[in-house]
C-alpha cells in the first residue's frame, strides 16, 4: 500500500494477562469495558488512583489463547505489572511483562485502517481515532519486517507524532501527569477511553462526578508553535496571567493543557516567549459558554 508509513514505538511495551478470569479481573480496574475486546478490536482505557487520577493508559487487545495484551508505556510497564499483581487476589489470572519479547509499532497514513490482517502479529485499528492508524504488537524484532512485506515504509517517530499532535491525542505520561491528571480533561471521553455503562472500577466515582457536574474547566488542546518549541511543562500565558502549560511536542506542534476560555478566546497566548495558536479538533466536545 503506497503512501503508508510505519514506525516502531520503542517507548511502548506489552503486558500479558492470561487465564479464565482475565476479562472480569480487568473489568473492575480500568475505565473501559473489557467485554468489548475481540479479535481485531481493542479498547483504550486507563488505570486510575482511588481518587480518580491518572496512573497508566493502555490498549487492551485480544491475544488469543485466553490472553489479553495490554499495550502501555515501556518504562512504567514493570511497575504496572506489579500493581496488577497486587489486585489479583483469588482471580484466576497470571500477569507477565512481555517487554523483552514483543515490539509495538504503528502503521499510519491514508487507508491504513484497511491494511490486511498481519499474520504473526496482533493488529487493531486505533480505537481512539481511525486517523491514527493501526497498532501492531509483534514478536521482538519482527514488526518492521512484517510491515515492510506489506509495502509499508518505515518512518521516524516524529512523523507519527506529527499526526498524533495535529489531532490533539495524548500519549501516556508524556501528556498526563501521573497521580494528578483527570481523564476528562485529556479527551478520554470523546476518544472512547471511558465506558459510562459498565460497572464500578477504581476511580469511577470522581470520573463520573466530573462529567455529570460539568466540573471540567481545562482541556488538552493541539497547538501550533510560532517559533522554537518550548520544553514540556512551560507555562502558557494570556495577558500575563497563567492559563495552562505545554505537554509533549515536536517541530511546530504540541499539546497544551489550557483553560477552555483561553483556548476559545481571541487574546494571544504565549509560552516561553513564543506565540502559540490553539485549535479545537473535530472530535472534541466543549461546553457552550
Image (cartoon, rainbow, N blue to C red):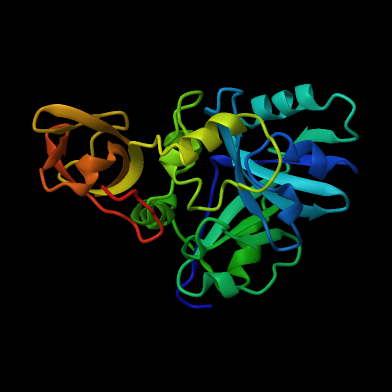
With respect to residue 61, does 39 lie above or below? below
Is residue 30 visible to the viewer in this orientation of the structure?
A: yes
Image point (38%, 56%), residue name: 167
Please identify the quarter of the rendering in which residue 23 is found.
top right
Left or right of 157? Residue 37 is: right
User: In front: 23, or 125?
Assistant: 23
| Number of numbered labels in the structure image | 0
Q: Position of residue 9 (x, y in %)?
A: 54, 48
Identify the residue at image location x=23%, y=45%: 263
Q: Position of residue 57 (x, y in %)?
A: 57, 39
Residue 145 position (above or below residue 79)? below
Closer to us: 128 or 215 = 215
Q: Residue at x 45, y 30 (%)?
A: 181
Relative image position of residue 165 (x, y in whole percent): 36, 51
Quadrant of residue 27 in the image?
A: top right
Left or right of residue 204, residue 262 in this image = left
Residue sitting farthest toward the front: 213
Residue drawn 33% across the image and 37% down it: 218
Residue at the limit of the structure toward the bottom, as seen here: 1
Nearer the observer, 24 or 134: 24
Above or below — where is 278 with respect to 206? below
For residue 106, side relative to residue 256 (left or right): right
Instruction: Look at the image and tell me whether residue 251 can be seen.
Output: no
**Residue 34 percent location from the top left of the image:** 73, 48
Amino acid at each position: 500500500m503506497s503512501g503508508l508509513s510505519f514506525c516502531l514505538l520503542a517507548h511502548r511495551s506489552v503486558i500479558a494477562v492470561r487465564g479464565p478470569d482475565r476479562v472480569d479481573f480487568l473489568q473492575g480496574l480500568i475505565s473501559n469495558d473489557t467485554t468489548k475486546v475481540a479479535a481485531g478490536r481493542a479498547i483504550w482505557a486507563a488505570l486510575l488512583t482511588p481518587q480518580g487520577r491518572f496512573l497508566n493508559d493502555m490498549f487492551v487487545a485480544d491475544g488469543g489463547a485466553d490472553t489479553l495484551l495490554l499495550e502501555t508505556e515501556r518504562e512504567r510497564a514493570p511497575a504496572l505489572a506489579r500493581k496488577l499483581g497486587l489486585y489479583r487476589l483469588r482471580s484466576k489470572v497470571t500477569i507477565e511483562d512481555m517487554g523483552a519479547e514483543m515490539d509495538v509499532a504503528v502503521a499510519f497514513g491514508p487507508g491504513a485502517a484497511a491494511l490486511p490482517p498481519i499474520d504473526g502479529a496482533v493488529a487493531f485499528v486505533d480505537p481512539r481515532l481511525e486517523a491514527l492508524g493501526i497498532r501492531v504488537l509483534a514478536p521482538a524484532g519482527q514488526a518492521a519486517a512484517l510491515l515492510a512485506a506489506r509495502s509499508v515504509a518505515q518512518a521516524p517517530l516524529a512523523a507519527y507524532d506529527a499526526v498524533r499532535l495535529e489531532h490533539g491525542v495524548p500519549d501516556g505520561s508524556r501528556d498526563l501527569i501521573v497521580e494528578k491528571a483527570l481523564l476528562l480533561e485529556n479527551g478520554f471521553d470523546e476518544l472512547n477511553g471511558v465506558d459510562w455503562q459498565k460497572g464500578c472500577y477504581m476511580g469511577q466515582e470522581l470520573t463520573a462526578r466530573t462529567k455529570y457536574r460539568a466540573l471540567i474547566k481545562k482541556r488538552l488542546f493541539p497547538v501550533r508553535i510560532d517559533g522554537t518549541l518550548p520544553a514540556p511543562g512551560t507555562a502558557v500565558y494570556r495577558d500575563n496571567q497563567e492559563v495552562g502549560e505545554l505537554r509533549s511536542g515536536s517541530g511546530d506542534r504540541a499539546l497544551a493543557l489550557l483553560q477552555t476560555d483561553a483556548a476559545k478566546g481571541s487574546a494571544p497566548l504565549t509560552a516561553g516567549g513564543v506565540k502559540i495558536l490553539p485549535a479545537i479538533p473535530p472530535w472534541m466536545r466543549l461546553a457552550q459558554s
